[in-house]
Structure formats: structure tokens, C-alpha cells
Amino acid sequence: MPNTEATKPIYTEKYKKYVLYVLTGVYIFNFIDRQILVILQESIKADLNLSDTQLGLLTGLAFALFYVTLGIPIARLADNTNRKKIIAVSLAIWSAMTVISGRAMNFTQLLLARVGVGIGEAGASPAAHSMISDYFPANRRATALAVYSMGIYIGILLGYLFGGWLDEFFGWRTALMVLGVPGILYSVFFYFTVKEPPRGYSENLSTKDAANYSLFQVFGLLMNRKAFLCLALGAGIHCFSVYGVGNWLPSFLARLHGMERGEIGTWLAIGSGGGGALGVWLGGYLTDKYGQENRRMYLIIPTVAILVSIPLLAIMLSTANKYVVVGGNIVVKTLWSFYLAPCIAMAHGMVGLRMRAMASAVFYLFLNLIGLGLGPLFIGMASDYLTPEYGQEGLRWALTMGIGMSIIAAFLFWRASVYLEQDLDAAPK
């Protein structure tokens, strides 16, 4: 139903893009603080005398468990209250906890600080996704979400680049503190320059006519959408490879290829950061372009990208040439990033106006619990198990788990495409 509210604001295209870029800045800080431990983990391991299993907990499950657990109720709050305030407070909290991480003196203290980072970051993306969907209509939404999601890879780029060199010259504690402080300042800037859009603004709909569902009703609706279940499970399994391989690649380059921390940070900034940013933008742009005539293309394009990446990953993990590894990583990370923006756009297309943040939170529950939570942990455990027999090669064999998981993920994205159109057509208002 058309939005007839007299107070409805008018946002220019210039301002919409401004908000999108500022939200992308929030996401950049999100991933600087989330992934910074990855580039620092070899120094942290030596300083605090940690095992690979403990590193897997710190870079994966400790963060992901609290992130996904609190993400659901905070997303529900975002569907019914001011999203801008939630994002600003969340950014300040996780940035402060990153600074505190630099003061940790043992595994337990660092674990608790990482839990704090996860608690803070739980409030950002679902609320940001909901705001973006209100600023940009359905036929531009995947592209807008792709721009926002580029923040992941720009954050990884900056975290790896600055984290690697700060660690090499000043130590891992200084790196955490230096990279945590700017986010606190940015939270104030964000709060005072971004406006909260009316819900349904991009579709010219009013929330007066939108049903208000309970948390359990929203969750139940999503669980009854076959396309959502397949794409969410596929994203989780895909991210088992993304985070599992990505979080252990710095250690792989250090242990098996003898690269120094600054060099690793620079190459991974280019590959994981630059390649990932290109891939997530291409995923949004191409699916918006070809998905208008055939909506299944929103999930078929990511399926093809993952399948193409599989032989490249096998070469990357088996070669003895470090430049093949870092070069292959650029292409693999580009292809691996196609999935994110179209998956979120399709999840929002399956639900009503007051359900979008919740849809993102449930999607991220699968993605982060399976991918971020289990991927780095399982590979760390496998490395600890295999190292006594295979030495440093144990990590190489542990990383090959990512190949099998990518095959399963591609199948699930394809299955999601089969059910997609019927689930989009059944979406409530």
C-alpha cells in the first residue's frame, strides 16, 4: 500500500549513497577488528604459548558463538526501534574491546576480550542491512548490499596490511590498540551524520499496514522457506572454507613458505582484501543485472563461481611456490565472495518490512556459527592432530578440508535457486 504519511522525508540519490558509504565504513571497522587477530596469531601463539586449537577458538568460535546468539534479539530490537543508535553503540563497544584485547596477558583474558568484540559486532550488520533495504529498492538492493559488503574485504585489507607491519615493528599488542581506537571516534561521526529512514521507504510502503510478527513467528517463517534454508546452510558451509582457509593462510605462508609477517600482511591485503572486494561487488552487480529476467540467477551465479574456485584452491594448497599461493588466493577470494550480497537480498525479499534485520541475523547465524565458528576451529584441531606425524605439512592437509566443503556449498546454492521464485512470491508485507 502506498505510503501516505505526511511526514515522509525525501532523500536525494546523493544522500542515499552517502549513507551507504558511511555504513560501509562501519563494516570496514567491523572486519578490521574481527580479522586482525588472524594476521597476529603467530606472534600471539609464541607470546602466550598457545596451541593451534586455542588459536582456532580465538579467531573463530569464541567470537562467533556470542555474535550469533546475541544477533537474534538485537536484530529483533532493530526491526522495531532506531537502527542508527544500535549501530553507533555497537561500533563503540567492539572497538573498545579490541583495544582491551591488546592488554590481555593470557589465553583466558584474550578469549574474554574476543567475546566482547563478538557481543559488540552482533548489533551492526542486521540493522545496517535493514536500513539499506529501506534506502534502495529491490532491483538495486543486491548492488547496494554488495557495496556495503565490500567493507568486509576493505577491512581485511587494512587489517592485514597495517596489522602485519605494526606487528613486525611494534608487536601484536600495539597493533590491536592502534587499530581499535579509530572505531570509537567513527561511532560518534556516524551517529551525528546518518538519518534513520522510514521502514518501507524504498517500496513506498507504510509500516502502519505491515504486520508485526513475534521473534518466533519470524524464525518459523524463515525455517519454512526451502530457498532460505538451502542458501543459509550453503553460506554456512561455504564460509567453513572461507574462514577456515582464510584464517589459517597467514600461518600456512609463515610455516610452509617461510614468509615474514609484513610480507604476508601485504600479499593477503591484496588477495583477501582486494580480491574479496572485487568479488562481492561483481556478485551484487551481475546478479542484479541478470536476475531481473530470471530471479534464479541470484543464486546460480554464486554457484558457478564456487565451482570454478575448487580446482584453483587445490592448486593453491598443493604447490611449493609461494607466489602461486598468493596469486591463486586473489582469484579464489574473488570467486568466493560472489555469494554474499545476492543471498542477503534474496533473504530480505522473502520477508516483510519488520522482518529484514531478523532475516539477516538468522542468515548470519548459519554463516557465522558453521563458517566462522567451526571452520578455523576444526582446521586448528586437525592441524594439531596431524602435526606429530606430518610436521608442518599437517596444516596443509588440514586446509584441504575446504575443498570438500566448497562442493557441498555449491550444491546447496543450486538447490536454493530451485525454490527461490516460489518463496519470493510468498513473502508477507
Image: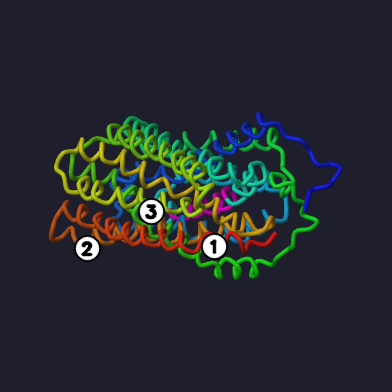
Q: Is residue 402 magenta?
A: no
Q: In the rendered structure, which amino acid carries the disc numbered 2? A: Tyr
Going from N to C along the chain, the mark reached first, 1 or 3, is 1
Going from N to C along the chain, the mark reached first, 2 or 1, is 1
Q: Which residue is mark 1?
A: 69
Structural distance between the alpha carbons of marks 1 and 3? 28 Å
What sort of colour scheme is used for the picture?
Answer: rainbow
Relative depth, front residue between 224 and 93: 224
Q: Residues within 10 Å of mark 3 (few under 14, many from 20)?
A: many
Snapshot quadrant of residue 239 = bottom left
| Mark number, residue 385 | 2
Image point (30%, 32%), residue name? 262
Image point (70%, 47%), residue name? 203
Relative depth, front residue between 207 and 381: 207
What element does badge 3 sit on? helix
Relative depth, front residue between 390 and 137: 137
Look at the picture and state if 161 lies above or below 391. above
Image point (27%, 59%), residue name? 401
What element does badge 2 sit on? helix
Q: Position of residue 190 (x, y in %)?
A: 64, 36
